[in-house]
Image (cartoon, rainbow, N blue to C red):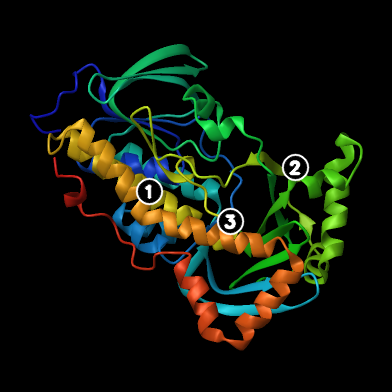
Amino acid sequence: MSQGSTVSAKGFDAAIIGGGPAGCSAAITLAGLGARVVLFETKSYPHDKLCGEFLSPECGSLLAGLGLTATLSALNPVMIETVCVSAPDGTAWEARVPGVAWGLTRKALDTALAQRASALGVDVRSATTVTGVAGNLEAGFTLDTRSALGRAHVRAQTVIAAHGKRSALDRALGRRFITQPQPFIALKAHFYGPPLPGRIELHTFPGGYCGMSEVEGGAANVCLLAHSAVFQGAGKVASERLRAFLEWMPAQNARLRDWLTQAKQADPRWISIGQVSFADKRPLVNDVLMAGDAAGLIAPLAGDGIAMALHGGSLAAVHCAGFLSGHFPARALRRRYVAHWQREFSAQLRLGRFLQAIMLRPAWLAHGLRLLNAVPPLGRYVLTHTRDLNLKALPISVGGSL
């Protein structure tokens, strides 16, 4: 840090909550700028995550900016070149992905990111949960943590929360969306099935859709989103509901049925999360900068969640760096970060929600897919405007160099 830093030698310049793409991106960026950073991750590495495990074309330049190009290549990601979407009535649309995309497990990606952060001097504390955050940008923050070693308090001048879609921390911070019922459930598992060479496929059913694409090691990631009413309606008995839903779902789409009936699940467990929220969230809460899904969750069908997480983490980090180095005061950080975040992501999130509303209605989707087949430029528009194909590592000047 520069001599202008107001951080006590006993604390950290920045504390990052969450060790996924957004949190690690923030930690790596800040460490590269000379900040003293601590990163908290609730689970131990390596671990699995509920995710489409699709690295969109923008991820390549973002990961390169974090110094992970060689590491990423060594992980043997599967190249994905084609997207296919199908409606329950058999209507389908295919198109080329605009750029080079990859299939890679979150277990591999998150571990590589955390190792990169650690190599740069970040204090990575896995298997540690942040239970509370108190303070502000002027006075600094105290984080309450819990691990197998017991409870502890950690001081930091800035805090970036990248803890994912929802957690107990959202409730501790008093975030409004966490108290409102949300209508979606998500499920994920790996399967060994018919090859999906260079493809990501999205097969819809009434009230939901299921995505599948190959990842390293020969398996395919199967990840789905469904309206809670559809899931609950599949079975009257709660203990049998998952089995009943997984029997009902493939019967609604022939392409999905044909693939799943030939596939074998790699692990009998499904990773699941309920109360998935696509509602607007505030990117700054109690002076804590939100990043990744904690700031706003894009509809999974857009396939841009990991890129947004990597970009959002770096965005938060660079703004923190500008504040820590004295380039601008706390009031400017608050204003600049919120404005920059909204400028970068709001339009993508709105378009993703609009497209998801269509995906969840089979008749609308079938008409839409026929339109995309009839007007190819419209399909290219959809593919390019749910992502920012010009994303690169952020210049330090956005927030101020240290």
Q: Secondary structure at mark 1?
A: helix
Task: Say if mark 2 contacts mark 3, CB within 8 Å.
Answer: no
Q: How many marks?
A: 3
* Mark toward the viewer: 2 or 3: 3
Q: Determine which residue is flagged by label 1.
A: 312
Q: Give the spatial CA distance, label 1 vs label 2.
A: 31 Å
Q: Secondary structure at mark 3?
A: helix
The quarter of the picture where residue 251 lies is bottom right
* Mark toward the viewer: 1 or 2: 1
Q: Determine which residue is flagged by label 3.
A: 300
Task: Say if mark 1 contacts mark 2, CB within 8 Å.
Answer: no
Name above or below for residue 91 compared with residue 200. below
Q: Position of residue 377 (x, y in %)?
A: 50, 84
Q: Give the spatial CA distance, label 3 vs label 1.
A: 17 Å
Q: Give the spatial CA distance, label 2 vs label 3.
A: 21 Å
Q: Residue at x 13, y 40 (%)?
A: 402
Give the residue type at disc 1.
Answer: Gly
Mark 3 closeness class: few <14, some 14–19, many ≥20 residues within 10 Å: many
Q: Residue at x 31, y 47 (%)?
A: 339
The label number, if any, that marks residue 269 in the structure image: 2
Is 294 placed left or right of 190 in the picture? Answer: left
Mark 1 or mark 2: which comes first in sequence?
Answer: 2
Mark 2 closeness class: few <14, some 14–19, many ≥20 residues within 10 Å: few
Mark 3 or mark 1: which comes first in sequence?
Answer: 3
Give the residue type at disc 3.
Answer: Pro
Give the residue type at disc 2.
Answer: Arg
Q: Nearer the viewer, residue 347 or 398?
A: 347
Name above or below for residue 321 compared with residue 395. above
